[in-house]
Image (cartoon, grey):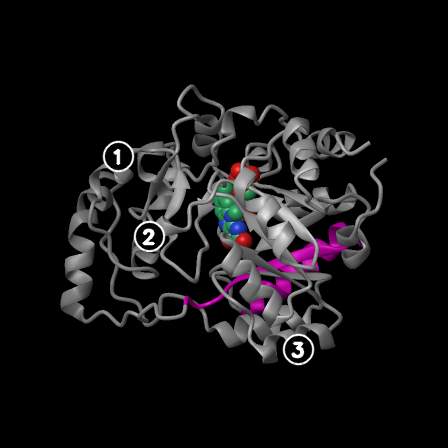
Amino acid sequence: MSRPTAFTRLTGIDHPVVLGPFGGLSSVDLTASVSAGGGLGSYGLYGYDGDRIRATAAALRARTTKPFALNLWLPVPGEVEPEPTAADFARYLAPLRPYFAELDLPLPERPERYLPDLDEQIAATLEVRPAVLSVVYGVPSPALMAAAHGAGTVVLGTATTVDEAHALQDAGVDAIVASGAEAGGHRVSFLRPPEESLVGLFALLPQVVDAVDVPVVAAGGIADARGVRAAVALGADAVQVGTAFLATDQSAASSAHRSMLRGPDAAHTVLTRALSGRLARGLPNRVTAEITDPAPFPVQNWLTGRFRPTAADRGNAELLSLWAGQSATLAAEADAAALLRSLVAALD
Ligand SMILES: Cc1cc2nc3c(=O)[nH]c(=O)nc-3n(C[C@H](O)[C@H](O)[C@H](O)COP(=O)(O)O)c2cc1C
């Protein structure tokens, strides 16, 4: 049985183990399973509108009465909101046309918008009163902090550098995820370009712990008991695990993605902008090799999102985003509850 930490007291969970949110790939099954097991299941709301957020929270509550976290992406300061013209759109689509042809899909029309309205997402998220709201890509506004605390929701920010941890603490977040460069998925840096913010967790974690007074959650490359113990030794109040849970039977990752995570090439992750326009860590495939000049985010993510689900249905791993962290080969458990138990056992 793990001992309480500042993070477990803050969030009301039994064990300081967090399932990382997976924007686009979270599943109610996996999130509920981790929360029901006494950890903190997180669910990524990237791309969800208000109705879908309310439905997701209801589905989670139908499965568990325990606390869970919902996760939102904040707009990156200084990132130009791209409003591509018809000509821009055609230019961005051009390098992707062969993939639509290969999958027998029609070319997409230019959409009215690429992402749901952030205010709508925030309102719906706070309306359902999750125990925890975790955010990436920035610092929550004073209004968001006040509204979250008014709803009884704990706010978790995400830092990839010590400077970002300071900024998050100054904004009043209740706890900070220190996300090392080993982590799977997007590099959520917001003060400097992500390419200049690639600090490994062994270096980042103790520096963030020294820099802030709030509890720190270690993320990036933690996939088994050894990683949990190392993170605790470096001062973590909790661990956040992504890739090892993504590989379990309860995850929403396609079978093509999951078999790549379990395959011989799982060790060879790359950082790429090819799939979404923003830097992210995953396994290489044809898209990461061939797309050298992607459209800006969120246009590229929307465009590839028109063919990725079909590629997943057809088991075509070459045309998917294969997000994975550097410890993917350590992801040994097939069952999420068993993985959670093995991570918690390291805290005895
Ligand atoms: C497929 C995938 C999607 C992710 N999406 C999000 C997201 O939407 N929001 C977020 O805060 N973190 C996201 N992450 C990061 C994870 O929540 C977690 O912090 C990270 O996976 C931990 O590193 P690890 O993969 O080495 O365990 C994602 C990771 C993966 C693998």
Judging from the image, what secondary structure is the residue with disc 3 in? helix
Residue 228, picture quadrant: top right
Q: Is residue 143 left or right of residue 154?
A: left
Asked if residue 290 shows in the view, the reply is: yes
Vertical arrangement, residue 37 with respect to residue 140, above or below: above
Secondary structure beneath disc 1?
helix
Q: Which mark is residue 147?
A: 3
* Between marks 2 and 3 in the image, the one whose residue lies nearer the viewer: 3
Q: Residue at x 65, y 33 (%)?
A: 230
Sequence-earlier tag: 1 or 2: 1
Q: Residue at x 48, y 51 (%)?
A: 24
Left or right: 50, with 190 as reference point: right
Please state, as top left, top right, bottom left or bottom right, where the C terminus lies in the image. top right
Label 3 environment density (alpha carbons within 10 Å; few <14, some 14–19, many ≥20): some
Residue annotated with mark 2: 306
Q: Residue 196 at x, y = what percent?
A: 36, 51
Q: Nearer the viewer, mark 1 or mark 2?
A: 1
Q: Residue 158's spot in the image, x, y percent?
A: 55, 56
Tell me if label 1 and label 2 are in contact, CB under 8 Å: no
Q: Which of the 4 quarters of the picture holds residue 317?
A: top left
- Which x, y percent locates residue 45? 54, 59
The Cα–Cα distance between marks 1 and 2, rounded to whole angstroms, is 17 Å
**Cα–Cα span, label 1 and label 3:** 44 Å
Front-most of residues 245 and 304: 245
Q: In this figure, which residue is indicated by the disc labeled 1?
A: 286
Give the residue type that dot 3 points to: Ala
Q: Amino acid at mark 1?
A: Arg
Chain part drawn in magenta: 50-76
Q: Nearer the viewer, residue 184 or 311?
A: 184
